[in-house]
Amino acid sequence: MVVWAYAFGNTGHEESIDAFLIVEPAAEDQVVISKTISQAKLMGQKGDPFVGRCKITLSGPRNVVARYVESELLPQGTLKVDRTGRIDLRSVDLFQLPQGLSVQGIDPSSLDVVLDSMVRVEKEVRASVRGTPGPGFVRFPGGISTDPEKITLEGPSQLLEQDVVAVLTQAIDIDGVVLPLVEATVPLVITGDDSKLIRIAEGFPAEATVKIHLQENLTQVQALVSVRYIVDEDVDLEIRGDQSIKVTVSGVEEAVREWKKRVDEGRFYLLVRGTDTGGEGRNIPREEVRWIDGSLPDGISGDQVKLERIILYSAKRIEVPGEEPQK
């Protein structure tokens, strides 16, 4: 009688515990697009997204149930889905249990699952650029390139075959840049995918090299600039040659206006070192033409100062009456 009572009391025990259920496709070329609760008592309402949390009711001998509950902090089951539709969780074996245990109930008891096939789609890589270049430079159509130009994405067909998904580069800031070329290697970003089920296909890079060509947007102005000759203090020369020459400069608009003002006011002029040529004409190479340091405004570089032509001059000593010529 005692043995029978113990055996009867140790069987048919039920206990409800928290568990976690993973929902995944049965085939590798498929993906679960969505999973929502269709019937539940405690673990959510109809239409709520199913995030894996559930409650299962275990049945079996009391001691076996107790040992299992103590050893498994959060039992985990797997639902393999091979079709779109409503899945009754009570009709399938989801959890691996010790001998003698069974699942008598599960909440939620059914799910609505949407399954889709995985496809590969080629997408153009678009460069994301922000900011405005510095003075004298502008962006222009066709001035941006990426390497690679395209990559292949992998994901659900109903998402990838729409135009909402795009591949952008991480934003590149060119604010204030005054260089003709900006080059950067940055990560790629997939946009338009709220499901987070789309990924870059295996074998394709997760970053791209972006080249941004900037176009010079310089103002040009021409002015007649005075030419001044410099000679040694102890030398008297009679110099004949160009007294002025047309000069063209290129630069940002503000700097060019300032240069023209300085020319008109006589604060910018060209300097040529004069030497005795014996009265013969001499051409002055461009690299020998100077100007006073600081007289060229910031925003105009030396190589942006263009002379209309080569400066020409001749020079000979001034003979003082009664003075013997130097040998």
Image: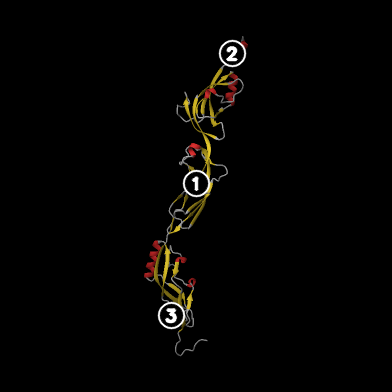
Whether residue 36 is visible, yes or no, is yes
Q: Residue at image x 42%, y 74%?
A: 227
Residue marked by disc 3: 240
Q: Is residue 169 visible?
A: no
Q: Earlier in the sequence, mark 3 or mark 1?
A: 1
Quadrant (top left/top right/bottom left/bottom right) for the N terminus? top right
Left or right of 253 on screen, residue 69: right
Front label number (1 vs 2) = 1
Hey, which residue is sitting farthest top in the picture? 1
In the rendered image of this protein, does residue 293 appear above or below residue 209?
Answer: below
Q: Eyeballing the image, is 205 above or below 266?
A: above
Front disc: 2 or 3:
3
In the rendered image, which residue does mark 2 sit on? Answer: 8
Residue 86 image point, x, y percent: 49, 26
Q: Secondary structure at mark 2?
A: helix
Q: Residue at x 49, y 25 (%)?
A: 110
In this rendered view, identify the residue nearer to me: 4 or 196: 196
Q: Amino acid at mark 2?
A: Phe
Dot 1: within a 10 Å radius of its alpha carbon, few (fewer than 14), some, or many (20 or more) residues? some
Q: Give how far apart the Cα atoms at labels 3 and 1 are.
A: 66 Å
Q: Is residue 227 left or right of residue 64?
A: left
Which amino acid type corresponds to the residue marked 1 in the rendered image? Glu
Residue nearer the viewer, 151 or 171? 151
Asked which secondary structure carries label 1, the reply is strand
Question: In terms of sequence position, does the residue under pointer 1 or pointer 2 come before the other?
Answer: 2
Which of 263/65 is in front? Answer: 263
- Residue 208 image point, x, y percent: 53, 48
Q: Which mark is residue 124?
A: 1
Disc 2 versus disc 3: distance between alpha carbons?
130 Å
The numbered mark, 2 or 3, whose residue comes first in the sequence reads 2
Residue 252 vertical position relative to residue 267 in the rendered view, above or below: above
